[in-house]
Amino acid sequence: MSEKERILKFHILRYNPQIKGDTPTMKIYEVQEAPGMTIFIALNDIREKQDPSLQFDFICRAGICGSCAMIINGQPDLACRTLTSKFPEGEIKLLPLPGFELIGDLSVNTGKFMRAMSERVESWIHDQDADNVDLDRLEERMDPDVADEIYELERCVECGCCISACATKRMREGFLGAVGLMRLARYATDPRDKRSNEDFYEIIGDDDGVFGCMTLLGCQDYCPKDLPLQIQIAYLRRKMAMVR
Amino acid sequence: MKVVYTDSLIIGGGLAGLRVAIAARQRGYDSIVLSLMPAKRSHSSAAQGGMQASLGASVKGEGDDEDVHFEDTVKGSDWGCDQDVARMFVNTAPKAIRQLAAWGVPWSRVRRGNREVVINGEKVTITEKNEAHGLITARDFGGTKKWRTCFTSDGTGHTMLYAMDNKAIELGIPVHERKEAIALIHEDGVCYGAIVRDMITGELIAYVARTTTVATGGYGRLYSVTTNAVISEGIGCAIALETGVASLGNMEAVQFHPTAIVPVGILTTEGCRGDGGLLLDKDGKRFMPDYEPEKKELASRDVVSRRMTEHIRKGKGVPSRYGDHLWLDITLLGRAHIEKNLREVKEICEYFLGIDPVKEYIPVRPTQHYSMGGIRTGATGESPTLKGLFAAGECACWDMHGFNRLGGNSVAETVVAGMIVGEYVADYCQTNPLRIDTKLIEHFMDKEKNKIRAVLKRSKGESPIALKKEMQQIMMDKVGIFRNEADLTQAVEELKDLHQRSRNIFLRNKISSSNPELVEAIRVPKMIRLAQCVAYGALLRKESRGAHAREDYPERNDRDWLKRTLAYWKDENEDLPQLEYEDLDVMKMEMPPGSRGYGADNTIHHPDTEKRMAEIEDIRKANPKADRFEMQQLLNPIELPEKFRGKNERIGRGFN
Amino acid sequence: MESLIVDEKIKKSRIPARLDLIQSGTGLILGLFMWVHMMLVGSIILGKDAFYFVAKFMELSFLHPTGEGYPAVVFFAVLGVFTLFIIHAALGVRKFPISWKQHAILRQQMGMMKHSDTNLWYVQVVTGFIMFFLGSVHLYVMLTHPGQIDPYLSANRVINHNMWPLYLVLLFAVEFHGTIGLYRLCMKWGWFAGKNPVESRKKLKRIKNRLAVFFLAVGLVALLVFSVIGIRHKDRVGEPYKPQAAVEKTLLVSNSSS
Ligand SMILES: Cc1cc2nc3c(=O)[nH]c(=O)nc-3n(C[C@H](O)[C@H](O)[C@H](O)COP(=O)(O)OP(=O)(O)OC[C@H]3O[C@@H](n4cnc5c(N)ncnc54)[C@H](O)[C@@H]3O)c2cc1C
Ligand code: HEM
Ligand code: HEM
Ligand code: SF4
Ligand code: F3S
Ligand code: FES
């Protein structure tokens, strides 16, 4: 905190596809650093004082909702919980997440992508009886460890970092990507989901699915929630490779 | 003019909105959900601590049932709630949680055998029963007699919202993202949908529907420091207010959470204290037992927040450049527990404070957290004054929280209200075919278009961001935890001034498509109106009840104030809301007003209280054989949709 | 019954699963083969006799009545490896960035993130591409000269037939490709993950680096030794090596007949 009077230099990609003829340019903004400043605070400061048109997405500003992922000095990460003090040079370059439809500046349409992903992997419990459970009766029991394990896999916040960090996904549009594989692994672990391995194979048993993953591990290394992506993709791969 | 027709329009894709949409869809009605952001990013996902439902599976929840939950909820509300609704709620909550379990929420489960927990600062071993193994477990939360708060580690809201949204996706319910409802379409006391702005293209679209449900969450952002998301700005409430027909209830009831981190206001869950964390002052002394010998750190939130503020005022706060704060100590819970059950808290401490809560104290301070008030609805969730308009979740004053809601009762409300209100929404769809004149749609469309045009055209005036900041500061300084006549009067005046200035907003960035400044320009005048409802309501309510604490009127005054504030904004040109009051009928209460058992008790009683007590006593005597269900029917007969009327089973006691 | 038939019809092809297994299987065999290969070739460091012994041993000389061995064994071994090599390469090529655009994206991504495992994969692609040509040449040579592996003949190839530049490049290519490939195999299938996969990964990466250094060292020294032998042997190109001690021969014979 000693160098608190620093002037930070933000290099931000500016582009509004809604405006005809606009072209992407990098713009530089200077911001006086404050103690405990996050990129969330800094960007709002820029919007308030320098450029009201700057677009970005923050919701929870607490690292929980996953809406603020962007490329920060080359690394995909959640901007709201990135302290500016992390960058000793005081130069911070911000780009929108690649691999998603750009809305404008730093804002991308992860929602559309994630909905499509959820539909593709059928991200819900498949159990014909789920809608007929007698709500008055005791719930079905579940082993506490299994419940914990599922929760571990459900901590994904759909931020999209793993998509932007995956060169495979970037090269091959159709590839499901780590977030989708993770989601499927979550259901494959859940005893309430009655889908068989054959069913899962129908969803990810091809080169757009688990066999398309080239184990680049960008997903694993950039997931801000530290989900066990590598292990889970490997688990699915083993499972799917053994389907007869 | 782009018009989208549907049966059931739901504004808001949080837990409440999605659950209503699911209910309507399952009954065969087309539902469209609008959301500012992807539904899974709604603020419901931030709920860490848990959801209350009296399952009583954990050994510390033994003996829990609807009645105990009801009692806690009513006491928590400081008798400000609607007891019919509280009853509907507690009876349905166990079903809600069980349904969510079937839909995929990985609730943390009971593990048989011994387990070490921290109670009252000491390590205690509790033994979970063999038969309970694998059932949904629960933790302790403030203001509850039993351990009733069910959870998934510390990601309860996240897992609930994901399960809910996934269910909605399964049912093919469209969620129209990045769409903001900016006005309701209505005529002759009937609501027909909303005018909606596409936040990417800037296009205005009319969504026309048989029923319109507002589920837009809280309005914490009226305050400068809040635990709420930056989108919790209350626009849903504001557009209901702006109809002039619907009213907002109890807007002055604003909850402050005891433990948000300083300075940014990010919440550390009540689970920290529930699991045994302590509050310490600058001398490292645990001070809560001095104020609340009974419940200590786990008194209800309004009480703990006030005690903390009192303690800080006594000079016991830890000074910092951001003002005084206190410490939350969870070091005694141990690394294993923190890393498993309070991991989000740990992450927050690491990322935003740069400390390790396993070893260090967390700087905390009471911070705005929850809005008990909202769109006034009846027990069916429908506005009593604007037909076809429903509300559910935090934005609604369905009124099960009264003047203070208990931790864990809110996500529970979103789901339970979603289930119940959803059924009534479907009923309404069934009986009310859509009949609407396109002229009416055009009228509302043009009105909004013109407003936006006027703002874009103005070449000088007020900055919306500056106005908002001023408003937030006024609310923080003058309509906070402790309130008094002088501050409130000032606040009301200053807000009035802001409201006038807000008619003169101008933009530096004059484009109508995606433009964050324009979004502010649309929202800020609405937010100021909400703030006025809060401040004005607080000024007029001359008593202290729940979260509404008047220094000049410290007593709860049932005699004069056992009533709900209703705020209307009937005339657009007015500069103040019009307040009306709705009595709470003591003679219908299942639980007449009494002492909460924590906090100071200096109640001025209602004349009917004694009468009702006697009456209840008589009813009990007259029906000595009545079991608790029959008794409840006698004291508090409630209407619930058919499918939610069954009794709830519990381990060890069956359906009793 | 009817629904079963429908199910049967919409069933997704199992081929991608098989191909993935084959890709990894061939990679694994080739990767492990290269360890053995480098040790065998590296025996030249211990001396010509050692190498000669190994070469003959590989020709199963110990089964041969006069100890000359069966060059056909080598031929078939090479054929087998060549087949694996081709299958593996054919499957590997599928993963290459197939268009310029894809390649540009990959490069841009690497430049942006500077992420080690992504870069490692690119190394695999490039080395794979190189081996596609150089490896084929080497294997073709081995295929067509089965009986001609001995200290002198090999050294001749290295120096007098100017194979050394090819070997040098191939050595680096195969060692990088192979060790990275084996590390990736562990990641890909979740092998050796243990209780703490993050730690295990770090460990495996360390092992991978050490193996690469080790085999590169062995290969480079071996190449140097071949070069020295080759230069010394320059004027007698084509003359095979004669092991010095006949004792050894008898030893071998008695060994194989016992
Ligand atoms: C940090 C934190 C922790 C909490 N922890 C707990 C807890 O442990 N237990 C508990 O019971 N409660 C907790 N709460 C409270 C609880 O999370 C909320 O009250 C509840 O989730 C609100 O849900 P909702 O569905 O009403 O609204 P939200 O989840 O806030 O959803 C609002 C939705 O409305 C949409 N929207 C808003 N305005 C518009 C508009 N104009 N047009 C279109 N769409 C709009 C938004 O996009 C969003 O989808 C916590 C709250 C906070 C802030
Ligand atoms: C023509 C030559 C070769 C080409 C084009 C080639 C190409 C590739 C490619 C592209 C991959 C990555 C596959 C993936 O990411 O899914 C790969 C993996 C691998 N290669 Fe090769 N390779 C060649 C030769 C070799 C040789 C000679 C070896 C032996 C050392 C080898 C060992 C491996 C191993 C162990 C893997 C990991 C297997 C896997 O990821 O499934 N390759 N190869
Ligand atoms: C069964 C198949 C193989 C046989 C029998 C074989 C045999 C040999 C022999 C005898 C040598 C010593 C030099 C020489 O005689 O020319 C050699 C060297 C070499 N081989 Fe192979 N090889 C085989 C497969 C491969 C493969 C698949 C590769 C990698 C693609 C490879 C890479 C090399 C390299 C890099 C060297 C030089 C080593 C050094 O001295 O540093 N070989 N091989
Ligand atoms: S898996 Fe991780 S990186 Fe990917 S979307 Fe989920 S949280 Fe983000
Ligand atoms: S980065 Fe991509 S290639 Fe696989 S391991 Fe992760 S999905
Ligand atoms: S704003 Fe929610 S994760 Fe950053």
Image: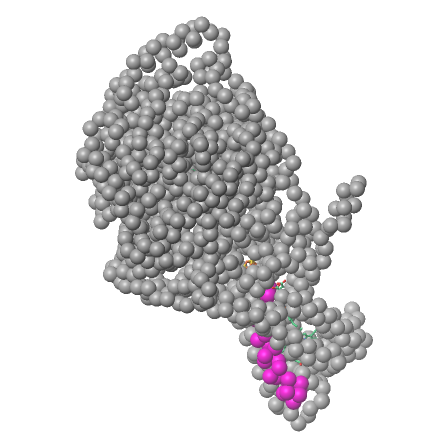
* B274 versus C5 height, above or below: above
- Quarter of the image where one finds residue B28: top right
Between B558 and B304, which is closer to the camera in this rendering? B558
**Is residue B203 visible in the rendered structure shown here?**
yes
**Is residue A75 visible in the rendered structure shown here?**
no
- Residue B242, position as x, y percentages in the image: 37, 38
Q: Which residue does the image show at 34% across and 10% down from the upper left?
A: B611
* C182 versus A124 height, above or below: below
- Quarter of the image where one finds residue B378: top left
Prevailing SS of the magenta stretch: helix
Residue at the extreme front: B439
The span shown in magenta is C156-183
Horizontal side of residue B240 vs C253, given as left or right:
left
Tell whether position C166 is magenta: yes
- Residue C184, position as x, y percentages in the image: 58, 62
Tell whether position C192 is magenta: no
Q: Which residue does the image show at 24% across and 37% down from the upper left?
A: B492
Q: Which residue does the image show at 24% across and 61% down from the upper left?
A: A5
Q: How many marks?
A: 0
Q: Which residue does the image show at 24% across and 23% down from the upper left?
A: B555
* B410 versus B262 height, above or below: above
- Residue B258, position as x, y percentages in the image: 31, 37
Horizontal side of residue C234 vs B53, given as left or right:
right
